[in-house]
Image (tube, rainbow, N blue to C red):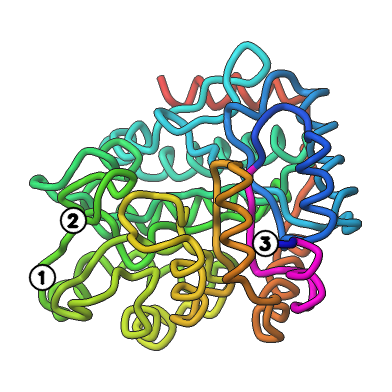
Amino acid sequence: MCVQAVKLSISPPLAVIFGCSGTVLSDEEWRFFSEVNPFGFILFQRNCNKPEQVKALVSSLRIAVQRPNAPVLIDQEGGRVQRLKPPYWREIPAASCFAELYNKDQRNALKAARLNSFLIAHELLELGIDVNCAPVLDLPQPEADLIIGDRAYGNDVNKISALAMATCEGFLEGGVLPVIKHIPGHGRANVDSHKALPLVDVNLDSLITSDFVPFKNLNFMPWAMTAHVLYQQIDRDYPATLSKKVIQLIRNHIGFEGLLLSDDLSMEALDGSLKHRTVGALAAGCDVVLHCNGQMDEMVQVVSGGLPLSDQAKKRVENAENFRIQSRVSLDGTFDYYVQKLEAMLT
């Protein structure tokens, strides 16, 4: 497939966020991104060696698409999911640490969660990264696969909502957009969606009073990421990412009006070609699709099913950026001072 022909047939930016393969852009990646003009990019541990290298990579990605405001994402949750690691970046506690602290001292736990995410945002923004795929709002169930586990803020919807809210506030105050995930809930997943499609056979009324609650409580947040989960009593045929029925619930019942991003289309939970997955996710109501592994042949397939960012999605992007700018506050003191303060709060 000719990438240039694809570009001529659709208006930029393309409603796709792509990963890249290494610590610098190859000539092939540079040409591809320049021609295709994806909406944004996402980084992983394979892309991040040292601060100056990450800054240069982020700059290269934005120069390639000639958009200095192209969003650059990362998954920097803490705990098991941390793309930026010591010695150049601090070790970040898992969400479950704040849930445990909440059981002892709610006020201190909320302050700690907010400070922690503020510090994460400071580290990310120093590198030019302006979107963090966190926090996790999923409500884990005892019988579920452990893929969520300690990434969640406990197993009570009120606790999850409160800690996730504090975390989002910290990200925004630090100048980074949070992405609430995995909407409308991944906590009942019986398998890891990276490997297979989770099936959830629970009625809608039960989901409304449990899994959906944290997302509804934070429905005003600017970005959200879908769950690759098949909710069998809502849509027997399509997982949430590809389901018009589920996305209608996300919009109409949960009330989320922000930018809706698919989870990674290359995950094994989804079947069919990557073109088919891309077409399906956008048709179902996702604003933007995510493809993470940086494999060129797969990215070309995604482009073949892609569409330009819709006018409604553009408006959501603008609203999110305004939210980020209006929420930001300066770091009043040294970074190390606040790191020490957080450590004291967690001990």
Q: Quadrant of residue 20?
A: top right
- Residue 107 rendering spot, x and y as whole percentages: 41, 44
The residue that disc 2 covers is 188
For mark 3, give the secondary structure.
loop
Callout 3: few (<14), some (14-19), or many (20+) C-alpha neighbours within 10 Å?
few
Name the residue rendered at 43%, 62% in the picture.
273
Amino acid on which disc 3 is placed:
Met
- Tag 2: residue type? Arg
Quadrant of residue 323 in the image? bottom right
Location of mark 3 (residue): 1
- Count of numbered tags: 3
Q: Out of 59 and 197, give the one closest to the viewer.
A: 197
Please name whichever residue, 93 or 63, is drawn nearer the observer in this view of the structure.
Answer: 63
At x 72% / y 60%, what residue is drawn? 38
In percent of the image, x 55 and y 53: which residue is there? 291
Compared with residue 238, is residue 173 higher up or lower down, i.e. above or below? above
Contact, mark 1 vs mark 2 (Cβ under 8 Å): yes
Looking at the picture, which amino acid does disc 1 mark?
Val
Q: Is residue 313 left or right of residue 12?
A: left
Q: Residue 48's spot in the image, x, y percent?
A: 67, 26
